[in-house]
Amino acid sequence: MRLHDDALLKHFSYINGSWHSSNTQLPVTNPASGEVIARVHNADVEQTELAVKSAKAAFADWSKTSANERAALMQKWYALMMQHQDDLAQILTAEQGKPLGEARGEIAYGAAFIQWFAEEAKRVYGDTIPAPSGDKRILVIKQPVGVVAAITPWNFPNAMISRKAAAALAAGCTFVVRPATQTPLSALAMAELAERAGIPAGVFNVVVGDDARGMGKVLTQHPDVAKFTFTGSTQVGRQLISQCAEGIKKVSMELGGNAPFIVFDDADIDAAVQGALDSKYRNAGQTCVCTNRIFVQNKVLEAFTEKFVKAVKALKVGDGMSEGTQIGPMISSQAAEQVQDLVIQSVAQGAKVVAGGTTPQRNFYQPTVLTQVRNDMPIACNEIFGPVSPIIAFENEADVLAMANDTEYGLAAYFYARDIGRIWRVAEGLEFGMVGINEGLISNAAAPFGGVKQSGNGREGSRYGLDDYLEIKYLCLGGINL
Ligand code: SIN
């Protein structure tokens, strides 16, 4: 990693505007090489409490700043992120593994949330409501919820933080995040840039530590935390929601997915192949919105499969830092082995490997395609979180909708079709929070990201993304006619 600005590489938690050391350190490993690239000081429960208390103290002033003042600071933060896009991307690829081009894309994606919410801060409108009697007036104002605590994942070390933090700061909340211990460097670089942008001490705090249980307890149960937000697995999310229940915290959760990708017989097949590649192999299949099951209508099964398999076989796997790499390593060798297990179990039940499927080489898993898959096989029922595409044939619209919806998850779905009646019917029939229609890449700052069923609640990005960070207050003004 060769940075233009070495000061972006930080090794300490960022609490109340200063960098905090501790007695032990956590190694940060490059998943492509296994090399330790940094050692970050391991924050504990007490430092997490300090971060929450600092955020509480900072809330008093930050919540009283004008939307314009907050927006100006956030715009500076955004500009600094874009100015340092290359360095931030290098740090991200070194700790997470995704190809450098994708990492640059993630920095722009992450920064876009800061820019978007800086603008939205100015549009937190209230309301007036006609009162049932003449001597009263009903007014509605919106106020920041207070201290927001967050736990974020390793698959998007930058954007999953900015998507939450930007909405929180724009609303007037203060923020404490515990990033994944595999990828703390991106979070700490964001803190460095927040400080340079002039975000006041205590408003944005990052605590890096491996005591997941102890720190998680503080972030979900501390009396000073008003709202908790998490991106990660449904299993962990469920546990965290139950911890929040005791203090009746406001929660928003962005959890697992099992995205169907449906190719109807009237689809543009080349566009569908490209869409499937985009939505499946982004970040080596390690996103919650990655295609998990590809359903193809019988009439176009052969044509789609032939083109798709050819394209998958051409994907270049390698170190994310190397020129031309399209698929980087998975986050760990265990992650690659889990994916391989799903493939082996499904093959034992009749699935056929038509691309890849080979034993993982450490963290690297070859992009894989399985055909003759059924919707009840392990590769279709589980969230794969890796570069495997199971192809399932179907006969008609009703059957495919039933199969697509037959999952506890409801995050993203995709389909390719041209018939306008079919497009409406299927878009309305899919039980998912987001639907890509003739489009495989749906994430951006202007759109409401989030799921239904066991994929979570709340929305991130878009104007709806502020709602989770605001309380509605009703003011009843009486005595008008006195
Ligand atoms: C995720 O995998 O959780 C986020 C993916 C995205 O923002 O597109």
Image (spheres, helix red, strand yellow):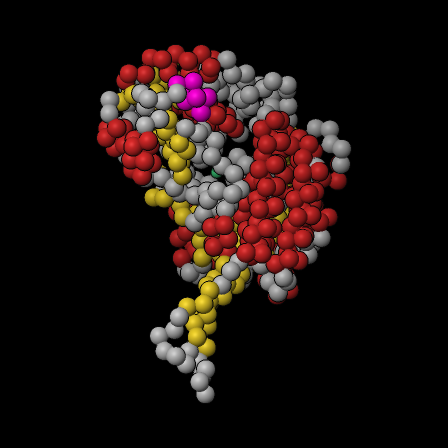
- Give residue 437's quadrant in the image: top left
* Prevailing SS of the magenta stretch: helix
**Residue placed at 40% from the left, 48% from the top?**
457
Residue furthest to the bottom: 482
**Viewer-nearest residue: 65 or 259:** 65
401 on left or right of 222: left
**Residue placed at 47% from the left, 55% from the top?**
467
Q: Is residue 274 magenta?
A: yes
258 shown above or below 459:
above
229 on left or right of 208: left
The C terminus - image quarter: bottom left
The count of marks equals: 0
**Viewer-nearest residue: 232 or 35:** 232
Residue 285 visible in the snapshot:
yes
**Residue placed at 67% from the left, 40% from the top?**
81
Where does the image place residue 197, in percent across and percent down from the top left?
71, 49
**Viewer-nearest residue: 179 or 315:** 315
- Give residue 322's quadrant in the image: top right
Where does the image place residue 475, in percent across and percent down from the top left?
46, 72
Residue 207 visible in the snapshot:
no
Where does the image place residue 255, in percent across and percent down from the top left?
42, 41
**Residue placed at 66% from the left, 58% from the top?**
69
Q: Is residue 187 magenta?
A: no
The N terminus - image quarter: top right
- Give residue 263's quadrant in the image: top left
Which range is magenta?
Answer: 269-275
Where does the image place residue 264, in percent across and percent down from the top left?
32, 23
